[in-house]
């Protein structure tokens, strides 16, 4: 029986329900010292004076790292990692020092005794799409062009009988994985060990080796468990450099460094706010003649980040006249990064609400409108889709949800409505190598991959068992350690496709060489290295999300009693962990729709609601009924496994479905996230 | 090491095992468990009582261990999710979390588990919640469970499965 497709419980489940799975801060080391970060309290300028006398006098303080008083390190592409080399301050909250002490209490106490003076420069932290200093980045983070243009969208807008021209905005969102970023660092015998909470141990090793001018052989990064990442642990952030600086200043002494929740709002990235100027042109039948999205987001002076919010508009719907663009505003703010479905998640908000607005204007069902505008081939590249089952997802979702009788209704004091939106996420493949070794009746599969809760510990053995044609129980798996072969970062929904493909190649090589009766110690490696974009096909996962929204007629309190998603995401390796991925994404999408907004105070340049009391995320009571289904999809083109990746698509479209449902319930169209009751209340019937 | 002025002796049991130790008077139960005793089952997600990841059972009641100073825990019984699985046998709540895949990254999970155990005990004691009519006999509906577990945040979004897990454990 094939192991792929089986409903297998998580291999790491026992360790996680008992709390015995060890995360980065919890590394089993003796005599640890504790490192606490010091942060700039200005948004731009230079540190002029530092008084550490009082802090240093505190018994138990081991060392205090301050700008210019640490070892020289190397500049790398990510300029933010050039930490403590000078006193320049590029954003409020930037690391300008660190205290290391025998206990966390002493370290925190000492940190409060370090005093900084500054030369303050004027800063600018005001985001607006109407600024005159918008600029065009060279290209998107995905490597795609910044702007695209086909036909004449302006002419299409002038000629069409039905048009939508609206501006939609998404708020600043912080990833906020439950495990704050943490590093335990040990420098001993000319070698560095980092237990780091990361989505990619090899990426951290490579970068840290470059920063410190070490051979990669001198650096080992270990991370068996990650307490969530959602992109915020996709690239090394400056605190890892600080932990390493501290470890090298105190050889032989393990250093534990965990960010506070508040520090995570400055130091580890966020989804920047986006403004999406969206245009649709349609004929009298609802066939699109034009579609366009012009996106603006903020970025940081110190490091550029473009949220590719225009990407999905390039692919979703057919229309002869098309345009997308991306512009940036450089501000004195913390550095944005990937957050679950970067590009697609915010970028499907505007267009999927706009489609709903067009459907309303035309008086057609929003599902029918989407079906009517299905493209034959990818409108952007002209390539055929390797598989595209958006329509099947919409139809099956409509059946399961009970879309047909969707008339808005009133239930006591509650106005009830329903909404739909489409989901999309590209199916990429990255590069990875896997090793398979045979030992005493067991196959040991090793790969420097990561499990952020995604299920890699469980699904990779399923793939290996089938590839080797042996029972699942005979497979051991090792991930999250740079002693295992190099693997790509867990990001872009590429993990299972990439690492699974490497395991497939390794298994094939192993069986070619050793047959099915190997000897102890027999070992082979296999690699996958394809360009992320398929040469012949446009490869995407699709989905459809349905929401029921209840709005209180007097208070405008908003509830989402029901969310239902149907996805077409290739082969599903493990339905149990897959369901959690889909519903988890949808729940985070609900959170984005109703709650999440980081408020930046432009006077000071920092996020003021920098904790979980003020930055609201969905709680259990918000998401009592989130349901995911998928259609059987066999895609022979996407990769040898037929796997598309499912970690991100669940969050794409959720917010639009909820906003559309709120409109259906109330008649009030909200175009700015999050959907809070103050935006609905004035317009309630 | 440390300031003598900040030290006090305290004794309590952790997962059934007695400990007497000199703690920093500024230390929370959470920090003593994690940094001094090496019991990292309770997690630190915010250190401000806002996320629930550090939930343990203190004399049988669920508490946020990041908000309890260690010096106030003298003579108490502290039970973590690790201790709930006595002799390697999972507590019914833990088994139900596994059965329903009510976890992903696992960082909030030990706190969710302890909180669920405490919540079910509170329910059994007839303590009302905000979800229902506080004057009526409480019924363990999904809404009731959701309300009672909402102090435990899960960023992976396992909530729907967490409710199912607690339903299963309550029926066990």
Image (tube, rainbow, N blue to C red):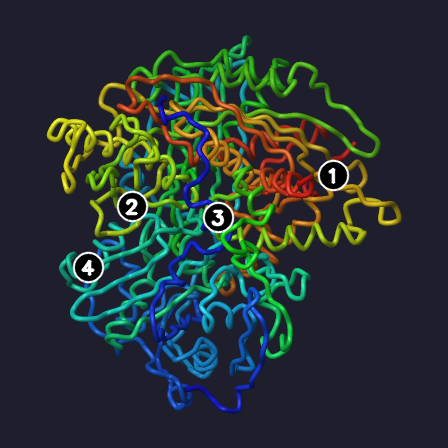
Which residue is the site of mark 3? A128
Instruction: Using the image, name the chain to which the residue with label 2 belongs.
Output: A
* Marks 1 and 4 in Cβ contact (< 8 Å): no
Of badges 1 and 3, the one in the foreground is 1
Spatial separation of the CA atoms under disc 1 and disc 2: 41 Å
Residue depicted at 15% across the width and 63% down the height:
A213
Based on the displayed image, in which of its 4 quarters is residue A666 positioned? top right
How packed mark 1 is, by other alpha carbons closer than 10 Å (few <14, some 14-19, many 20 or more), is: few
Q: Earlier in the sequence, mark 3 or mark 4?
A: 3
Which residue is the site of mark 1? B141
Q: Position of residue A246 (x, y in %)?
A: 29, 73
Instruction: Using the image, name the chain to which the residue with label 1 belongs.
Output: B
Instruction: Using the image, name the chain to which the residue with label 3 belongs.
Output: A
From what the image shows, is residue A507 above or below residue A86? above
Spatial separation of the CA atoms under disc 3 and disc 4: 39 Å
Disc 4 on helix, strand or loop? helix
Spatial separation of the CA atoms under disc 3 and disc 2: 47 Å
Which residue is the site of mark 2? A478
Q: Position of residue A18 (x, y in %)?
A: 50, 53
Based on the displayed image, in which of its 4 quarters is residue A62 positioned? bottom left
Q: Are marks 1 and 3 on the same chain?
A: no
């Amino acid at each position: 029986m094939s192991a792929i497709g089986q409903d297998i419980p998580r291999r790491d489940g026992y360790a996680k329900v008992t709390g015995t799975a060890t995360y980065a801060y919890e590394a089993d080391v003796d005599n640890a010292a504790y490192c606490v970060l010091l942060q700039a309290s200005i948004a731009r300028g230079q540190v002029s004076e530092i008084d550490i006398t009082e802090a240093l006098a505190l018994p138990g303080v081991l060392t205090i790292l301050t700008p210019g008083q640490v070892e020289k390190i190397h500049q790398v592409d990510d300029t933010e990692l050039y930490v403590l080399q000078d006193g320049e301050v590029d954003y409020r909250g930037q690391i300008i020092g660190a205290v290391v002490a025998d206990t966390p209490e002493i370290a925190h106490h000492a940190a409060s005794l370090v005093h900084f003076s500054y030369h303050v420069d004027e800063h600018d932290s005001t985001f607006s799409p109407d600024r005159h200093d918008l600029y065009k980045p060279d290209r998107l983070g995905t490597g795609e062009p910044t702007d695209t243009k086909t036909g004449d969208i302006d002419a299409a807008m002038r000629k069409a009988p039905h048009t939508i021209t609206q501006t939609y905005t998404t708020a600043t969102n912080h990833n906020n994985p439950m495990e704050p970023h943490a590093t335990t660092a040990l420098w001993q015998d000319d070698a560095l060990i980092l237990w780091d909470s990361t989505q990619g141990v090899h990426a951290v090793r490579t970068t840290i080796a470059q920063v410190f001018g070490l051979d990669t052989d001198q650096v080992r990064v270990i991370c068996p468990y990650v307490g969530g990442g959602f992109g915020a642990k996709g690239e090394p952030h400056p605190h890892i450099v600080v932990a390493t600086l501290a470890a090298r200043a105190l050889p032989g002494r393990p250093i534990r460094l965990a960010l506070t929740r508040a520090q995570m709002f400055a130091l580890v990235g966020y989804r920047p706010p986006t403004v999406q100027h969206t245009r649709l042109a349609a004929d009298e039948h609802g066939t699109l003649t034009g579609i366009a999205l012009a996106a603006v987001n903020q970025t940081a002076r110190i490091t550029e980040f473009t949220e590719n919010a225009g990407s999905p508009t390039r692919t979703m719907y057919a229309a002869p006249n098309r345009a997308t663009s991306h512009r940036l505003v450089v501000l004195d703010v913390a550095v944005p990064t990937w957050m679950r479905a970067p590009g697609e998640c915010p970028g499907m908000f505007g267009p999927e609400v706009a489609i709903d607005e067009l459907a309303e204007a035309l008086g057609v069902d929003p599902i029918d409108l989407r079906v009517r505008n299905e493209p034959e081939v990818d409108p952007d590249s002209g390539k055929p889709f390797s598989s595209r089952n958006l329509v099947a997802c919409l139809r099956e979702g409509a059946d399961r949800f009970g879309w047909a009788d969707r008339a808005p209704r009133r239930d006591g004091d509650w106005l009830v409505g329903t909404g739909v939106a489409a989901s999309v996420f590209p199916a990429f493949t990255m590069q990875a190598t896997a090793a398979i070794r045979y030992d005493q009746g067991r196959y040991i599969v090793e790969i420097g991959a990561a499990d952020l809760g995604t299920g890699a510990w469980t699904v990779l053995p399923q793939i290996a068992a089938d590839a080797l044609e042996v029972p699942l129980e005979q497979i051991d798996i090792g991930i999250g350690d740079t002693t295992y072969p190099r693997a790509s970062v867990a990001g872009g929904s590429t993990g299972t496709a990439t690492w699974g493909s490497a395991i497939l190649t390794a298994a094939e090589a192993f069986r070619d060489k050793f047959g099915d009766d190997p000897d102890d110690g027999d070992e082979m490696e296999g690699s996958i290295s394809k360009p992320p974009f398929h040469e012949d096909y446009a490869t995407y996962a699709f989905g459809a999300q349905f929401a029921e929204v209840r709005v209180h007629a007097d208070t405008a309190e908003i509830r989402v009693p029901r969310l239902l998603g149907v996805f077409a995401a290739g082969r599903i390796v493990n339905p149990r962990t897959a369901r959690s991925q889909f519903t988890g994404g949808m729940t985070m999408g609900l959170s984005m729709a109703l709650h999440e907004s980081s408020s930046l105070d432009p006077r000071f340049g920092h996020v003021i609601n920098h904790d979980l009391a003020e930055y609201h995320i969905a709680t259990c009571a918000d998401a009592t009924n989130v349901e995911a289904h998928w259609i059987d999809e066999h895609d022979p083109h996407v990769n040898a496994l037929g796997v598309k990746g499912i970690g991100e698509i669940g969050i794409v479209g959720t917010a639009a479905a909820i906003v559309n449902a709120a409109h259906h319930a109330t008649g009030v169209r909200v175009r700015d996230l999050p959907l809070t009751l103050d935006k609905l209340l004035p317009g309630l019937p | 090491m440390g300031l003598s002025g900040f030290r006090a002796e305290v004794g309590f049991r952790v997962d059934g095992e007695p400990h007497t130790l000199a703690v920093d008077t500024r230390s929370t139960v959470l920090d003593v468990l994690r940094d001094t005793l090496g019991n990292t089952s309770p997690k630190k997600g915010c250190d401000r009582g806002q996320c629930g990841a550090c939930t343990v059972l203190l004399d049988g009641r669920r508490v946020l261990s990041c908000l309890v100073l260690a010096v106030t825990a003298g003579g108490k019984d502290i039970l973590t999710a690790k201790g709930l699985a006595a002799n390697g046998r999972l507590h019914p709540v833990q088994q139900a979390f596994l059965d329903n895949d009510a976890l992903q990254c696992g960082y909030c999970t030990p706190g969710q588990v302890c909180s669920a155990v405490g919540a079910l005990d509170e329910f059994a004691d007839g303590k009302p919640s905000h979800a229902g009519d506080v004057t009526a006999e409480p019924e363990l509906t999904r809404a009731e469970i959701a309300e009672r577990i909402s102090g435990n945040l899960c960023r992976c979004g396992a909530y729907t499965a967490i409710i199912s897990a607690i339903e299963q454990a309550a029926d066990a």
